[in-house]
Amino acid sequence: MNKKGKWVDEVLQSLDGIQRAEPANDLFDKIMAKLPEKKQSVIIPIKRLRWLVAAACLVIGLNIYVLSIGIRSSQKENTSESQSIELLTDFSLYE
Amino acid sequence: MYNTAIGYLQNIEDAEEITQDVFLTIFQKADTFKGNAKVSTWIYRITINKSLNQIEKRKRRPSSDNELQDFHKIDFNHPGGILENQEKMKYLFAAINTLAEKQKTSFILSYVEGLPRQEVADILKTTLKSVESLLQRAKTNLRRKLISVYPEGITKN
């Protein structure tokens, strides 16, 4: 192998044993100085949301139940009123 | 990141600047990371893109002959090199500077970073075979460049 070829081989092999380049000590501080301050965001856990949904369903369900009771009781009142009118008619003394 | 950047840019100040930019990008875009590759792969890609962009910016700076300027700037001392290899490494890094992007990246990641070939393929989003081919071409081109700048007055050391 001629001198030139040998030299080229040596140059190509000059990376053998190369260590990683280490940055200057203050690079980390420079990086931290560039990073913006991040606002703390509030994260609501999904478990808590499930409870909220369950509570909302319960409240709505109770309201529907109370309304239905109210409707039924007003229907009963109408029926008893009409019955009492019939009774009165049956017992009318003066015709 | 710093070691990769310095392999591309061959300048300590530029490598520090790129390292800072990469950290900032990771901080800002962490939520866009889809997890379809390793985190290190993602970080390498960011570092490589920023380094290549910086090289492009340099090329756009007005000069009489960019190629001559780049190649004859045989003065980069890689901080991690062995002392007895420093002189030869200067020629090698000058030659690396003249490689096409993909060949340069394959060579730097394989020989300066010391990454396994498969990891280089993952970073480049290509196949192992393609990386082997890129490395082969890189070495051929490096050899050609080095022969053209062989210092005639060199004495064996």
Image (spheres, coloured by chain):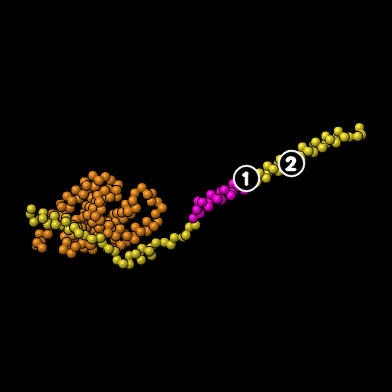
Q: Where are the magenta residues, as a range?
A: A43-59
**Left or right: B107 as drawn, with respect to A46:** left
Quadrant of res B130: top left
Q: Residues within 10 Å of mark 1 (few under 14, many from 20)?
A: few
Q: Is residue B24 left or right of residue A3?
A: right
The residue tagged 1 is: A61
Q: Position of residue A12 (x, y in %)?
A: 16, 55
Q: Would residue A51 be counted in the magenta stretch?
A: yes
> For chain B, what colour was chosen?
orange
Residue at 39 percent across and 57 percent down: it is: B27
Identify residue for label 2. Answer: A74
Q: Please identify which colour was used for chain A in the image.
A: yellow
- As drawn, A1 above or below A68: below
Name which residue type carries label 2: Ser
Rendering quarter of residue A25? bottom left
Vertical placement of residue B86 versus A70, above or below: below
Choose between A78 and B71: the one closer to the eye. A78
**Residue A20, position as x, y percentages in the image:** 25, 60
